[in-house]
Every structure is written in structure tokens, then in C-alpha cells.
Amino acid sequence: MSDDDLPEADRAAGAPHPRETFGLFGHEAAETEALNALTGDRMHHAWLLTGPKGIGKATLAWRMARFLLAKAPAPARAGMFDDLPPEPTPTRLDVRPDHPVAQRLSALSEPGCLLIRRAWDHDRKRLKTQITVEEVRKLNGFFGLSATDGGHRVVIVDSADEMNPSAANALLKVLEEPPKGAVLILISHQPARLLPTIRSRCRVLRMSEVGLEAMQNALSASDIELDDTSPALFELAQGSVGAAIRLQVEGGLELYAEIMNVIGTTPSMDRQRLAKMVERVAARGAEARLELAVTLLDLALTRMARAGAGVLPSHEACPGETELLTRLGAAPGRAQLWAGLQQELSSRIAHGRGVNIDAASLLTDAFLQINEASR
């Protein structure tokens, strides 16, 4: 497998990479805040873009990078041409796709930008589970080699949550003494996992889930066709365009229905049906489907907990879901039960996968605990 064919840790399956995405929908306020800061006199050297996964944080980060490298005045050159009339103030972070900077960024060949993300493990033939210190140390060479043009130098970390402790400490040193013209953009789905000292040195830009219209526009821009299952798709995606694309491309609606059908056989769970499903999602080479199954199981428990608190979904994510959620949440204390189990199983599965426990065993055990809890 050539380097060009390697999986990318920051790309959603079936979707264009954020660096290749030129439209941003539903985040006008966040973009305006970033634009005002990037064109102002005192631009912050570090940004922390926070919010749920898949809502457009990385797309905004790349829009910021394109704008800085293509349009924003270079710090070393500011004031050199004060006798010229000022250019019109931009109202968006738009850069044409055919702009040389945009094309170089899409090809990851722009010398003024460095992307830090989980690397490919050539020995294990898979993506590493963390961003290691070796990736962050690339900043030393990057700032040294790209300092001669006097322009901006942009670093994107996607996502900062995935840095191991050594990598986080190495990045903190750069944030404490940033080189001139450096702009670091950190993407975080769970900012509470970051070092407080990293958070304190960044300007935080909080982003929220997008609305229905913005999601429809974003999916259309990504060539995702919508049909009569769209309400269920939007329900499970929870305002995340990335999640909606993943669900559509990887058959997430069908997999969620399969998960709920197994849960629906509680408190005498159909072991044969469970075994068939687990065998399919935990098969060798089906890592993406396994990841999706774990995500959807977590979401199912969350929806069960909400139902236990009397909050039923506005749309069913699969046929018969409302009836099942009502049954599972009928007894007193069910909200706390399912919420507690969701946290316990999420932590247990993450730890088990981290120490290479068999995925089929982890999933089977999770469903059997759900079965026990339903009694």
C-alpha cells in the first residue's frame, strides 16, 4: 500500500476530506468570529475549536488555514505597503478552489501548513490509536524550514483529544512560546480531556450541532442522496453532518435496527441472533463496521435513558423503536439505570479494545449486561 492510499485518521468514510470541502453550513456566527479575529490587529496565535464530532470544526479549521495563507496580511510584511489603498474587507473566509494555496492544501503540499493527526502504524498495518510525540516534534522542523518567507505558518491538530501525554506536553511548549507568525488550530470533540494549560493558552471557539436545513445543504454538497429514510438519518446523526455521512455510507440505519432488534428480545435475549450480529460486525477487516456498532450501541443506551426520563424521540430511528423504548423505560429508576450502564459499557469497551481484548467478546458481554439490566 502506497502512502497515497493509506487511510486518513481525520477523514470520514465516504465523505470528502475537510481540506477538500469549501462550503460550511450552519456556523455563520463561528465563522464571523474567526474572520474578525484573523483580519484584526491582534490575532491570537492558538485556537481551540470545540463541539460534537462531525459538525464542521475541521472544515472551519481548513477554511481558516486557506484564508490565512492566501489572503490575510503576512505579519512580517504588514505596514510595507501603507501607501496603497486598502483592500475591501472580506465577509467570509472564502478562497476559490482553484487558488494555488487551496490546491496545495488539498494535496497536503503547502509549505506553510502542517497537519498533525494519528499516523499510520506500518508494523501493525493500521492507524495508531493516539497522536504520538513524534508527530508533534515535526513542529520543530516545520517552523525552521518555513520561516524564511515571513508569512503565516498554520498548524492544524485533528484531533487534539487524541494526543498522548508526551505529545500534549510537547505541544504545550510550543503554545507557551509560539514562533512569530504561527497560528495553531486545535480541533477537540472533548475539550475536558485536554490539559488545562493547553486550553488556557487557546482562544476557544465553541461550535454546536447544525440544524436540519444546514445538514441537508451540507449533505447535498457532499453528493449524499436523501430519501424517505432521511428523518431517521437526521435523528441518529444528532446534528452532525459527519455522522450522517457515515451512517448513510456504512449502512448505519440498518445496523441500528439490528442492534435494537437484539435488545428487543430482552429479558430473554435471543443468543443466536446476537451471535450472528456480533460475528458480522466483529469480523476481521470490518474495523469500520465495528466502530460504528460500538457508536450505535452507545447511542441506543442514551436513547433508552432519555426514554426512561420520559423523553421519547421526535422520530423513530427504526421501525418499532418508540414502543421498545417505552417498554424499556417504563419502570421507575430506568433513566439512571440505562445512563449508568451506558457510561460503564463505553468505558469498558474502550479499555478492552485498548488492550486488544477480542472485540466479539466485548460486544457479546455488553449485550448480555443489557439483558441482565432489563430484568
Image (cartoon, rainbow, N blue to C red):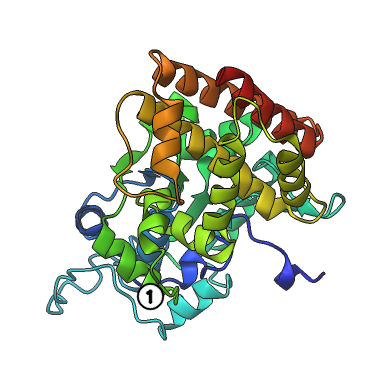
Please give the name of the residue rendered at 45% of the width and 73% of the height, measured from the top-left corner: 224
**Badge 1 density bin: few <14, some 14–19, many ≥20, Cα 10 Å:** some
Q: Which residue in the rendered view is the most extreme toward the right?
A: 123
Q: Position of residue 303 (x, y in %)?
A: 42, 35
Q: Can residue 93 be seen here? A: yes
Kindly indicate the quadrant of the structure image that contains residue 336. Answer: top left
Q: Position of residue 249 (x, y in %)?
A: 56, 66
Of 222 and 321, nearer the camera is: 321
Please give the name of the residue rendered at 38% of the width and 34% of the height, measured from the top-left corner: 201
Of 340 and 279, nearer the camera is: 279
Q: Quadrant of the C terminus?
A: top right
Residue with the mark numbered 1: 221
Kindly indicate the quadrant of the structure image that contains residue 307. Answer: top left
Give, as a three-letter code, the residue at label 1.
Ala
Please give the name of the residue rendered at 60% of the width and 51% of the height, measured from the top-left corner: 117
**Number of marks drawn:** 1
Of 215 and 315, nearer the camera is: 315
Q: Quadrant of the N terminus?
A: bottom right
Of 312 and 125, nearer the camera is: 312
Kindly indicate the quadrant of the structure image that contains residue 368. Answer: top right
Q: Can residue 303 be seen here? A: no
Q: Position of residue 243 (x, y in %)?
A: 47, 54
Q: Is residue 179 above or below residue 31?
A: above
Helix, strand or loop status at disc 1: helix
Please give the name of the residue rendered at 63% of the width and 54% of the height, measured from the top-left corner: 141
